[in-house]
């Protein structure tokens, strides 16, 4: 319960599946690193219960557009930094619940395949939002 940092990156299991409420017993988790797992499969409720999580690293996991379009981040009210770099994201159409992340300050989308940015999508970001890395 007192775990603050959890790094589960660079696993040699393909795919790595993170199930529903996988981290429910870690209510104080602040940093979750799932980066560089090559193929990461997430349940829509994988991050349920992580209300105190501030940093989520999901880089290099072959994640597609659904990572933004679905409700994966609905419970992450304290999220400040989100690293989605090096995935397979092609468009920026976040789920409406994404806009409830009012503390979010930075999203890293470098090394994806985003070819078109819409002002309407970027304009709805929370007021706390400071950096977009594309």
Image: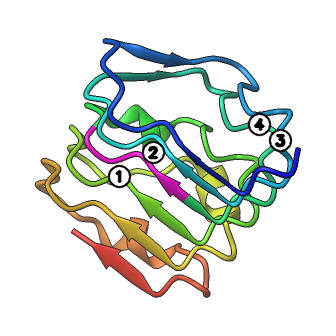
Question: Which residue has dot 2 on it?
Answer: 68
The secondary structure type at the circle numbered 2 is: helix
Badges 2 and 1: C-beta atoms under 8 Å apart? yes
Q: Mark 2 to mark 4: distance in Å?
A: 16 Å
Quick one: label 3, few (<14), some, or many (20+) residues within 10 Å? many
Q: Is residue 87 left or right of residue 95?
A: left
Label of residue 48 in the image: 4
| Residue 76 % position (x, y) | 71, 54
Distance, label 3 to label 2, CA atoms, is 19 Å
Looking at the rendered image, the quarter that the N terminus falls into is top right
Q: Secondary structure at mark 4?
A: loop
Task: Give the crowd class for mark 1: few <14, some 14-19, many >=20 residues within 10 Å.
Answer: many
Q: Is residue 19 above or below residue 84?
A: above
Identified at 70% across, 28% down, the residue is: 45
Tell me whether the residue at label 4 lies in contact with that at label 3, contact meaning CB atoms closer than 8 angstroms. yes
Mark 3 or mark 2, which is nearer to you?
3
Badge 1 marks a residue whose secondary structure is: loop
Label 3 sits on residue: 49
The residue positioned 25% from the left and 31% from the top of the image is 62
The earlier-in-sequence mark between 2 and 4 is: 4
Q: CA distance from mark 4 to mark 3?
A: 4 Å
The answer to which quarter of the image holds residue 51 is bottom right
As drawn, the label of residue 84 is 1
Secondary-structure class at tag 3: loop
Going from N to C along the chain, the mark reached first, 2 or 1, is 2
Give the crowd class for mark 4: few <14, some 14-19, many >=20 residues within 10 Å: some
Q: Nearer the viewer, residue 16 or 123?
A: 16
């Amino acid at each position: 319960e007192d775990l603050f940092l959890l790094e589960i990156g660079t696993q040699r299991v393909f795919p790595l599946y993170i199930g529903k409420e996988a981290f429910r017993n870690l209510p104080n988790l602040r940093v979750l690193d799932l980066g560089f797992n090559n193929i990461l499969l997430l349940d829509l409720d994988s991050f349920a219960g992580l209300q105190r999580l501030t940093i989520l690293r999901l880089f290099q996991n072959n994640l597609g557009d659904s990572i933004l379009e679905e409700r994966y981040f609905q419970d992450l009210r304290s999220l400040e930094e989100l690293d989605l770099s090096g995935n397979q994201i092609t468009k920026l159409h976040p789920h409406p619940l994404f806009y409830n992340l009012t503390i979010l300050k930075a999203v890293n989308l470098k090394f994806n395949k985003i070819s078109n940015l819409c002002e309407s999508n970027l304009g709805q970001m929370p007021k706390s939002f400071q950096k977009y890395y594309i």
